[in-house]
Amino acid sequence: MKKVLFWAMATWVAVAPMAAKRQPKPQEVDSLGRKIKTGWNFGILPSVAYDADYGFQGGLLSNVYFYGDGKQYPEYIHSLYFEAAYTTNHHGIFRFNYDSKYLIPNHRLTLDATYLPDALCDFYGYNGYQSVYHYDVQNYFAPTDTTEMYRCFYKYKRDLIRVAADIEGTIYKDLKWNAGIGLLGYIVDTCSRNPYQGGLYGLYQQWGLIGKDEQNGGWHPYARVGITYDTRDRRVGATKGIYTDVFFTYSAAFNAAYGQQAAAGYNHLQFNFTFRHYVPILNRDKQWWSNITFAYRIGTQNNIAGSSPFYMNNYLNTLFIQRVLYEGLGGANSLRGTMCNRLLANGFLYANVEFRFRMVNFDIGRQHFFVAFSPFFDLGMVTQPYDIEQLSLERTGITLQQNVEASGYKYSDFFTSDKKDIYRPHMSAGLGLKIGMNENFILSVDWAMPFDKQDNQKWANFYVKMGYLF
């Protein structure tokens, strides 16, 4: 792990000084006494990462910043991000992202174009703890089958194409309006590596929990409107202030993949609310332990009109696309330590709490670095569950238990009988290490453990990513 971090940072240090544009006039200093960044600052990095759910990642990325004369540093004028990578668990990343508050005067504009092929997308069933998870799948369901089936029982194939444009303007001071349009294209199928009844995904189709009009994906144009209130001192690594947003997303549906039945029945309206608070505890400028911040985030997403296809219910809506994928709930982008997509429901609530200790600031060449660590606690719960009994009865004509038993299984192998389990919170905790460069480029290493083994049997749940979670 240390070698990966050293290689990534050393490569940037070697490339960035040669690529950065030299400024003819002397640079000023920021509040920490360091020279501010001006002009263009860019380089090429190996896209080396690790995710407990996706495996090791390899590829290339580049984040190009333009600071102009540096008056707004550490804020940038333009940010362009490029990435092409693939993981050992057959998940691909091909992405371009642009972000600026200056291209359109007094407005923030974000553009994103992404293709994410995923041959082994996680699928653990509906409603969190109502769906029983078995780490040793072979011993429960198919003792004579191969290791490949064991690996893919909780997987399905999902390719996602995303194109989005989001804009923000000012209503009054820190109160902003937001609008956005985009297109989400899903191509969904059973995991090709799992011939045994298509795994859990295939069984859900047999039992009527996944309908024929959603089992192969679809194309979903959307429009989004909302408001935000933002008093943070900076967008990346905030040390004080509040960020909160309220927004609505209307998604249409057409042209189901592979020419299957159109998904027009899945037009729906979703509501999102997020509140983030950054509380400064200590700020000693240049000294060790230079900054301590208490940060927390609370959010919810619910379907308030129409119905959404299952494959869209693990997409966490956001006003501005900054990460590769906002997967929820479970995994590196929502509940660290909990398996990716563990909570799949029509609506959910989540919370993240962190203490951020910024230990030291230092320079290497012309680049400004810092090292920080952050213990954290994550929580998520279902607020709007699937009615799995009603779905099965409507689509197949028999009860869910009858469907399960007709497939040769026990109902208790897949579902709990206590409906209170649906609303039982999923919790995890861990520790993060951050290595930042020029305040905007932050390499993040998180380790996390769930409180319940139904959320993950592994203890070594590491995530090597870019940026803070929030």
Image (spheres, helix red, strand yellow):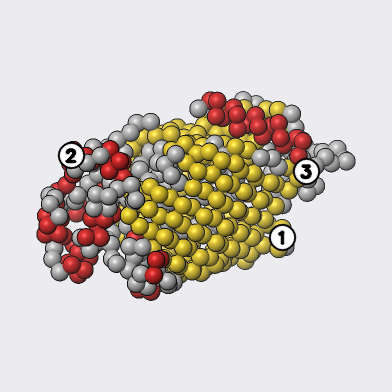
What amino acid type should be assigned to the residue bearing mark 3?
Answer: Thr
According to the picture, the residue beneath numbered tag 1 turns out to be 103
Q: Residue at the spot x=42%, y=60% of the render?
A: 187
Of 153 and 363, nearer the camera is: 153
Q: Residue at the spot x=65%, y=32% of the render?
A: 11
Q: Give SS at disc 3.
A: loop
According to the picture, the residue beneath numbered tag 3 turns out to be 38
According to the picture, the residue beneath numbered tag 2 turns out to be 143
Of 299 and 138, nearer the camera is: 138
What amino acid type should be assigned to the residue bearing mark 1?
Answer: Leu
Q: Is residue 50 left or right of residue 259?
A: right
What amino acid type should be assigned to the residue bearing mark 2?
Answer: Pro
Q: Residue at the spot x=40%, y=44% of the render?
A: 331
Q: Residue at the spot x=23%, y=53% of the render?
A: 197
- Which mark lies nearer to you, 3 or 2? 2
Residue 407 seen in render: yes
Q: Give SS at disc 2.
A: loop
Pinpoint residue 448: horizontal percent, then vertical percent: 40, 35
The first of marks 3 and 2 along the sequence is 3
